[in-house]
Amino acid sequence: MKKTLLQLIDISLRFGEEIILDNISMSFPIGKLIAITGPSGCGKSTLLKITAGLINPDSGKVLLNEVNLTGISRQALFKMRKDIAFVFQDAALISNLSAFENIAFPLRHHYNPGESEIYEKVSEVLKDFGLENEKYLLPAQLSFGQRKMISFARGLILNPKLIFFDEPVSGIDVITREKIINRILPLTEDPEITIILVSHNIDFIKNHADLICLIDDGRLIAYGEKDEILKSDDTMIQKILSIIIDEEAVVAEEVLDILMGH
C-alpha cells in the first residue's frame, strides 16, 4: 500500500450562487501520476489549484503530509512550496524577465545561492530542454510552446517531489507535446515523485496515468485505477469520457489551423 501524500476532505467552493466544487474527497498516494480530467468548465483546474494550496476552498481541508494547507500561515506555506512545483496552463512567466531569469527565479526566491551556481544550474536545465538559444529572450519573444517549456523547466529547477501540471500537453504542436511528454516520463520512474495533472488528452492519460479522477459539474464522478475508469461500463462515465475526447479533437483542430496560418 502506497503512503498517502495528499488528502482532500470535503472540498467545496462557490462563486456567488454557482457551485464550482461540491464536497470532493480523495487521497493521492506518493509516487503516482494522477490525472484529473473532465469536460471544459467542470472545475478541474480550480480543484488542482486548491490541491496545490494556491487558492483556498470555502470549506474542507487539504492535507499535505498531514499538514492542513488551508489553515497554515503564508510563511509556513512558503517553506513547504520549495518542494512543490506548479506548471500553469498559460505558462505564467514573468513578462519582464528573460527565459534564464524566469527559471532562476525559484532559486533566488528560496535559496539565493551564488551567481555561479545559479548560472550552472539554469544553463544545465536550458540545455536539457534544448532552449540554450532562447535563454536571453523575453516571454513575448517566445512561442507558446517555448513558454510552456520554460515554465516546466522553472518548475523542475528545485527538484520538487510534488509536481502539478495544468494541461501540459494541450494547445501545442505535436513536436513540443512530445518534448514535454519525454520530460515528464522520467519523473514517473522516481518512486518519491508524485505528479498531479489536469488534462483533456485521453491518449496521454491512457498511456501514462496511474490513477484517474473524473470530474463533472463540480462533482467527483469516479476516482480509481486507470483501467478501472477507462474500461468502466458505467454509462455516465463513458458519456463524460466521450465529451472529453470530442473537446480535445476540437482543440487539436484549432492548433492545426493556427500552425497552418488559417
Image: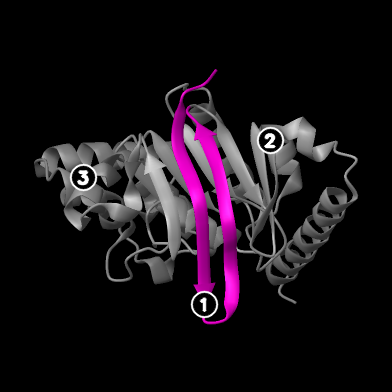
Distance between the alpha carbons at the discs numbered 3 and 2: 31 Å
Question: Are there few (<14), some (14-19), or many (20+) residues within 10 Å of tag 2?
Answer: some
Please state the horizontal and vertical placement of residue 212, each as a whole percent of the image: 67, 40
The residue that appears at 65% across and 35% down in the rendered structure is: 211
The three-letter amino acid code for the residue at tag 3 is: Lys
The residue that appears at 25% across and 50% down in the rendered structure is: 77
Distance between the alpha carbons at the discs numbered 1 and 3: 29 Å
Question: Are there few (<14), some (14-19), or many (20+) residues within 10 Å of tag 1?
Answer: few
> Which one is earlier in the sequence, the residue at label 1 or at label 2?
1
Circles 3, 2 touching at the beta carbon (< 8 Å): no
Question: Are there few (<14), some (14-19), or many (20+) residues within 10 Å of tag 3?
Answer: few
Circles 1, 3 touching at the beta carbon (< 8 Å): no
Q: Which residue is mark 2?
A: 224
> Which one is earlier in the sequence, the residue at label 1 or at label 3?
1
> Which one is earlier in the sequence, the residue at label 3 or at label 2?
3
Please state the horizontal and vertical placement of residue 179, each as a whole percent of the image: 57, 42
Which one is in front, 82 or 153?
Answer: 82
Please state the horizontal and vertical placement of residue 225, each as a whole percent of the image: 70, 31
Residue 87 visible here: no
Disc number for residue 79: 3
Residue 105 visible here: yes
- The secondary structure type at the circle numbered 2 is strand
The three-letter amino acid code for the residue at tag 1 is: Phe
Q: Which residue is mark 1?
A: 15
Please state the horizontal and vertical placement of residue 240, each as a whole percent of the image: 81, 56
Q: Is residue 4 magenta?
A: yes
Residue extending furthest toward the top? 1
Q: Which residues are magenta?
A: 1-30
The residue that appears at 33% across and 57% down in the rendered structure is: 99
